Image: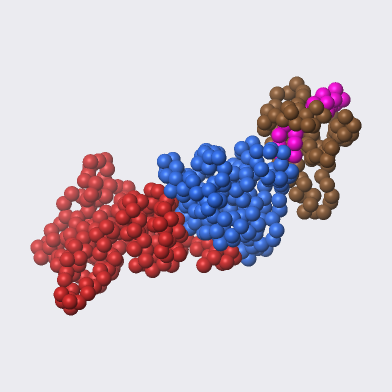
Chain colours: A brown, B blue, C red
Amino acid sequence: MSYSEHHLARHARLVADALLTDVDGASAIVVATADGFHLAQSGPRSVDPARLAAIVSSLAALGDAASRETGIGTPRCLVVDCSDGRLVVRCVEVQGEALIVVLLTDRSILLGLALNSLAKAEQLMNAA
Amino acid sequence: MNAMVSHKIVFTGTPGAGKTTAIAALSDKPPVLTDVRNTDASLGKERTTVGLDFGEVDLGDGQSVRLLGTPGQLRFEFMWQIIATDALGLVILIDNSRPDPLADLATYLDAYEALLPSMNCAVGVGRTLECPLPTLDDFADALAARGWVFPVLAVDVRERDDVLMLVDTVLAQAETRI
Amino acid sequence: MTLSPSDPVALAQASPERLALTLLTQRLTESDAAKLGVFLRIGQAQLLCDWRFVSEGAAHVVVVAGPEPDTVPGLLDNPRATLHVLDAANDPAGDAWTSLLRPLQYEAFTSALSRIEQMVMRPRVEAASSTTPAHSSPSAPAPVPMPLRDPALTLGAGYRLHRWPSADVLRGHRYNTRLASFMSTRHVEIDELAQLSNVSRSDCIAFVGRLLKAGLLDVKSTPLRLPAAAAALASDAPRAAALARKRPAPGLFSKIRHSLGMR
């Protein structure tokens, strides 16, 4: 399901486009609600944004459960490091609402750069 | 060293049917929840499960039964099979106040179709007092039409005994498959 | 209780509890005889009668290699049945009811014994159901017939639901839902139902009768279950005997029920 009329859809599109520009080697970006609806996507790689949004919302929720279980605060990022690429999932808060920004890259990108770009994306959304 | 042996019973079903409540009713400790704020107005609830609910019953001697709850919405179907694979049993909870509970049941029967032939399964129908239709017989007929004979019980998941009755039917089925 | 193999009247009037029936083998190879011995040890628990092999004299059943049994006047009067052990290559169209084709199969042997049990025991049920109790009089209330004699129930049959019962049918006994659950996955015999549920046999019979009247049951004669690797066990008699004594693990389900506070 696409939330094109969601009140944060515009913010989501802004960030999806910005990340594509900022991150060399970004193949897909999806911005989703915490309950798994995709708000925006960008990137040359073909992904099913609705399905990916649902999957990463589960990931994020499980990450949140793990952080509560271990008492280490609020989750910021989850990384799925694979043989042919990386999925970096950033949990953000925009106007008091939890969103998830997913960045799919190849392995040539330094993880730190990806995390830094995602942090800036959160600031961008809150400033918009 | 004692071998740790764990079995699992999965609660699935429509959003709002009471999966989280059912698990909480049985779990030894407060269950781990993965519910987040719901943005889908049609659901009529504030929060919704997007990962899985996790409860546990300790049997002693290193054995336990894990109680797992799936997210209810269809977009999380990918989780349903993952969670239900190798489960001791599957409980499908249906909310009879929804527009088409029989269609809801069909959704879950379709989703778990590959697992059902060897699955110990029970159907719990909630809110039957305020919404008596479809009847339990309608559900039994719907299952029989698809070749399934699963226990169909009216339940209030806030009542622990009702949830236990569902689990009991799952265990009984498992006993005959030994 | 051992009864003469050639006395169907005595058999008919005997108690419905376990009868002792005998098997006499003729001209079987050692290997075939050993296999049947193992099959019988494994399958005995699921048969209705107590079977044993005899080496001579009259027997209820003769198991002979080939088409014709040896006859000895006076010693083999009227066996109730004869089973012929045949090579499938030589007699592929052997009578399914009386032939055991090599290589001998557990299920074929125990199914044959079960059919013979039904044949032996049927006259007993019919005779018993028509017997007038000696103490009855016009003014005395008729004794409640044993549920086993319910003509709707078949001795040695397995029962399986083809549709979940309505709430009305489930009412009455607090374990009816559990009993129905046992019958929802496969055919289950009355004795097994009672054993699984710890509900009395008469209550099981009453509930099954109710399900039958509601048209909810599929009935199958003697749903004998083939243990895993029975053929392999046939060549390892001690292990086969040990496994036959080993029961499926009931502990897990008792533990779960106990931990959840269920009765």
- Quarter of the figure with the N terminus of chain A: top right
Residue C201 shown left or right of residue C260 in the figure: left
The verdict on residue B131 being magenta is no
Quadrant of res A113: top right
| Residue A86 seen anywhere in this rendered image of the structure | no
**Residue situated furthest top in the rendering:** A44
Q: Position of residue B127 (x, y in %)?
A: 56, 51
Residue drawn where x is 25% and y is 55% of the image? C115
Residue drawn where x is 71% and y is 41% of the image? B38
Q: Position of residue A121 (x, y in %)?
A: 86, 31
Quadrant of res C261: bottom right
Along the viewing direction, whichever of B1 and C203 lies nearer the viewer: C203
Q: Position of residue B175 (x, y in %)?
A: 48, 58
Q: Position of residue A26 (x, y in %)?
A: 80, 26
Quadrant of res C58: bottom left
Residue drawn where x is 35% and y is 51% of the image? C216
Residue A72 shown left or right of residue B155 in the figure: right
Residue C25 shown left or right of residue A44 in the figure: left
- Quarter of the figure with the C terminus of chain A: top right
| Residue B173 seen anywhere in this rendered image of the structure | yes
The verdict on residue A14 being magenta is yes
Along the viewing direction, whichever of B113 and C40 lies nearer the viewer: B113
Along the viewing direction, whichever of C102 and C172 lies nearer the viewer: C172
Q: Which residues are magenta?
A: A13-38
